[in-house]
Amino acid sequence: MKKLLFAIVFFPFLSKSQNSDSIFIRRIANEMLVNGKAYENLRHLTKQIGGRLAGSPQMVKAENWGLAILKQSGADTAYFQQCTVPHWVRGGVDKAVVTSIDDKKQKRTLDVLALGNSIGSGQKGVTADVVAVSSFDDLENRKDEVKGKIVFYNYPFNPTYIVPANAYGESGVYRANGPSRAAKYGAIGVIVRSMTEATNNHPHTGATRYTDSFPKIPAVAVGLEDADYLWQVCRKHKKVQVSFTTNGKFLPDTIGHNVIAEIKGSEATNDFITVGGHLDSWDVNEGAHDDGTGIVQTIEVLRTLKMLGYKPKKTLRFVLFANEENGTRGGLKYAEEAKAKNENHVLAIESDEGGFTPRGFSFTIDNARLEKIRAWITLLMPYGVYEFTQGGGGTDIGPLNRTLKTPLAGFVPDNQRYFDLHHARNDVFEAVNKRELLLGAINMAGLIYLVDKYGLDPNP
Amino acid sequence: MKKLLFAIVFFPFLSKSQNSDSIFIRRIANEMLVNGKAYENLRHLTKQIGGRLAGSPQMVKAENWGLAILKQSGADTAYFQQCTVPHWVRGGVDKAVVTSIDDKKQKRTLDVLALGNSIGSGQKGVTADVVAVSSFDDLENRKDEVKGKIVFYNYPFNPTYIVPANAYGESGVYRANGPSRAAKYGAIGVIVRSMTEATNNHPHTGATRYTDSFPKIPAVAVGLEDADYLWQVCRKHKKVQVSFTTNGKFLPDTIGHNVIAEIKGSEATNDFITVGGHLDSWDVNEGAHDDGTGIVQTIEVLRTLKMLGYKPKKTLRFVLFANEENGTRGGLKYAEEAKAKNENHVLAIESDEGGFTPRGFSFTIDNARLEKIRAWITLLMPYGVYEFTQGGGGTDIGPLNRTLKTPLAGFVPDNQRYFDLHHARNDVFEAVNKRELLLGAINMAGLIYLVDKYGLDPNP
C-alpha cells in the first residue's frame, strides 16, 4: 500500500445528547490512545509475573500487583475479597512417545500437555495400545475395544464456523468429558486433539471434568501435527502403542482473592456496574490474551475515567477475578457477597475472549432492552463496535446473573486468532497488539459510561 | 476463556433472491475455509521467492509463479501484459551512526533503511550536523540553519486516529516530499521518523519522490526508538553529528508484467470485473501483508469460483499488478490497454491494505449507487464485512477510474496491526493469520458474485 485517503468522520445523525456522549467517548479514546497504560501493565503481568494458576506463587504476586495498580490508577477504594480456590499443580514435565507400531519398536516423541485438573499417571506412566476415535459416537460403536487402552479423541476443530468460538464450543466437550467417558468403558488413559486450527504443533491444555462414578484416568492434549500423525498411523496399523507420563495432582484447596476497586457512585451508591476479567491463567504460558488483556483493560477503564474526572452516578466496580480457569470460585464468591449485601447490580461486563480488535458486545438481557440500547451502537461504531447481540456474558459474571438476574455483557473482539494460542505456550505478550488492546478498553469504558448515565432503559 | 455459547444464525430478514445469494456465498466460504490454498500459496511467495521489487530477479520468479498458479487455479486463460518498470536497487547495506555530540566523540549506531527511489550517499557517506524538526512548518522556521546539514523529520504517527491509515496519510508526506523540501534550503541528507506506532526499532522504507528543481539528496528512515533518542539528544545538545551511508540507485527501466487471468463471461464478454493486488514488494521483507495477501486472495477467488462451477455473466479479470510500490506502472498499463481495447469495466476491486480480518469495502462510486448496493451488506455481514463507505479504491485500480471512470472498491480489513510491519523487516509470512486471510477472500468473492449477477444498479 502506498497511500490512502479517508474522509473525516462527521455524525450529523446524532441527537444533541448523543453529541455530548460522542464527545466524552472521544475523550476516553484520546486519553487511552495517547497515555494508555494497558500495554505496559500487560508487559509487567506477563513478563515479570507470568503464568498464574489459582493457588500458585505467581497468582499471589499477581494479586498484590493488581491491588497496587488499581490503587495507583485512582481507585476510591481497592481491596481483596477472599475466596477458597482449587490448587491443581502440573507437577512436572508431561511426556509422551509412540513406543511401537504393530509390535515393531518406535520412538516418536509426541508433544503433550496434561489436561488441567487431571490426575498424574504415576512415575511408571501409562503404556497401552491406542483406540483412535473421531467422536463420542465413534467411541460408543467401539466401546468393547476400549478396556485397558488409551483412547485418542481426534475430533476436528470445524473450520467452517466463521466465529471460531463456535468450533471451540463444539469440540471442547472432548477435553471436558472425554476422560470420564472413556473411563466408563475401562480406558486407562486419554489423548485429546487440541481445540485449535493452528498451523503448528503446540498442545493446548485446559480444564477437564471427571465424573465421580468412573475412575479418574490421566489425560493429555496433543497439537495438530502430532494428532494428524497419530490418526494416520492408527488408521493404517492394527496396533499402535503409546506411553505417556504426567504428574498432575490436586493439593488441598487454598486461599485466593478477587481483587476489587471502586469508584463510588454520586447518586446511587448501592447501584453497581461491574467490569472485569480473570487474573488467573494456565501455567504453560504468560496468560496474555487469556486473560491478561481483560485484566489490563479493566484497569485502564478505571484509570481513564478517573483521569478524565468522571463522577459516576452509580458505583463502578473493577474486578480481577481469582479463579476462572479451573473452578469459577472467584465469580461465585463475588455473586454470593453481592447477594448477602443486598447490592443492586445494574450490569456486569466481562472481557475474556482475548484482547483483539473490537467487534461488539453480546448481552444476556431481555430483547426489549437490547433493542433500546442498540441506539448506542452509533456512538461506539467509530471505535470498531458495530453489533450488540443476544446471549453473551462470561464465566466470571455468570453467577451474578444466576443469583441476582443481573444483565450481562461480554466484550466480543474479533477472535480469528484466539484459538491459535488459547491455553497453549504461545499465549504470550508478543501476541498482543497495543492498539487492538486499547480499542477494546475504549469500548468497555464507553459502554460503562452510557449505562451509568442512562441505565438500561434509555429514552429514545 | 473457558466456554462460549453462540446462537445459530438465521436470516429471516433476507428476501428470496437474497436467500439464494446467501447460500452461494456460504458455499464460497466453506470451499475456502476447508480447501483454501491462499495460505500455502502465500507461504511459497514469501518464503520461496521473498521480497520482490520491480526489476529484481525475485520479481521475475514471482511473475512466472503467478502465471503458473493462475493456470492451475482454473483460469480460462492466463497471460503476461508487458509494461516498463523502474528498476531501483538498494545497492548494499544502509548504515548510520551518531558520530559526535557537542564535538565529543560518540559511536551510537542507528538502524536505518534508505528510502525507496533515493540516491546513494556515495562511499564516503554523508556526515553533517543534524537539524531536528517536528514538521514542515518547523522546517520553514529554521530554513536558514539547514544549509550543509542533515534534516531529521520527527513528525509523529498520530495515535488518536482510530484508523491508522489516516495517520499514515498525514505523516507519509515527510517520506515522499521531505528530502526535496530539505534540499531546497541546502540540506545534504535527510532522516525520517518511520510512519508507524510500532513498539520496536524497525525502520520502515517506502518511496520518496524528488522534485526536479532541487538537488537529489540521500535519505533514510529510522525506527521509533532511534527517532526518540535522536530527537532527545538534538533537543538537549547544540551539535549532534550523524554520518550515514546508502547505496541506492536507478538502473535503466526494465521489463515487467501484469499477470492476468480470466474467467470468460457467458453473457457480456466485453463487460469486465477486475480484482487484484500487487505482486511487487519492497526488498527488505517478504512482502507478506504488502501485498502478498492481496495476491493470494485474488488467486483464491479465481480458484474457488471455478471449483464451484460458477459461470459468470461478465468476464472476470484477476490481475497481479507489476509495480505498485515505486511507480504504479502496472496499473497505468492495465488502464491504457483497457481503453485501447474499448473494454467496458463495471467495477475494479483491490486488496492492498493487508490480509487482516475484514471490516468493509470502500468505494469510489456515485452516492446513489452506493446506497443501493448497501443492501448487500446483510449478505456479507456473516463474514465480517459490515460497512460500505465512500472514497476508497487502490493505487493499481486508480488509473482505471481516471481513464474510464470505472467504479472502484478497496477491500478494507481491520488495519490496527498494519503499520507495525508496513515496509519493515517484519512484514513476513508469520505475521499473517490463515483465517483472517481467507475471510478477506470470501468477502471479495462475494462482492464479485453480487456485482456479476446484479450489476451496480441492483433492484431493491
Image: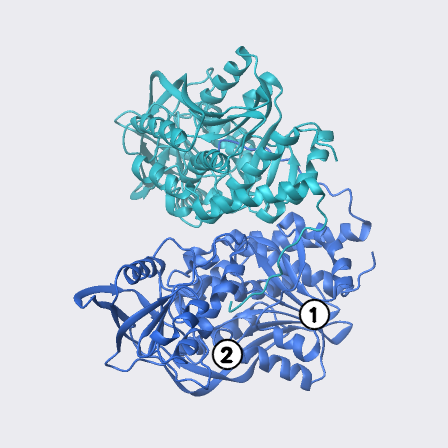
Chain colours: A blue, B cyan
Q: Residue at x 64, y 42 (%)?
A: B20
Instruction: Specify whether A346 is left or right of B297.
Output: right
- Amino acid on which the number 1 mark rests in the picture: Pro
**Marker count (numbered):** 2
Vertically, is A35 above or below B267?
A: below
Q: Residue furthest bottom?
A: A252
Identify the image quadrant of residue A154: bottom left
Residue toward you, A341 or A217: A217
Instruction: Specify whether A75 is left or right of A245.
Output: right
In the image, residue A424 lies at what x, y percent? 39, 64
Q: Residue at x 83, y 56 (%)?
A: A460
Q: Residue furthest left?
A: A105
Q: Which residue is mark 1?
A: A407
In the image, residue A78 lies at what x, y percent? 59, 76
Q: Is residue B149 visible?
A: no
The chain holding disc 1 is A
Label 2: state its secondary structure.
loop
Separation of marks 2 and 1 at Cα, in angstroms: 22 Å
Callout 2 environment at 10 Å: few (<14), some (14 to 19), or many (20+)?
Answer: some
Vertically, is A374 above or below B450?
A: below
Callout 1 environment at 10 Å: few (<14), some (14 to 19), or many (20+)?
Answer: many
Label 1: state its secondary structure.
loop
In the image, residue A172 lies at what x, y percent? 48, 67
Instruction: Specify whether A286 is left or right of A26.
Output: left
On residue A327, the disc is 2
- Amino acid on which the number 2 mark rests in the picture: Gly
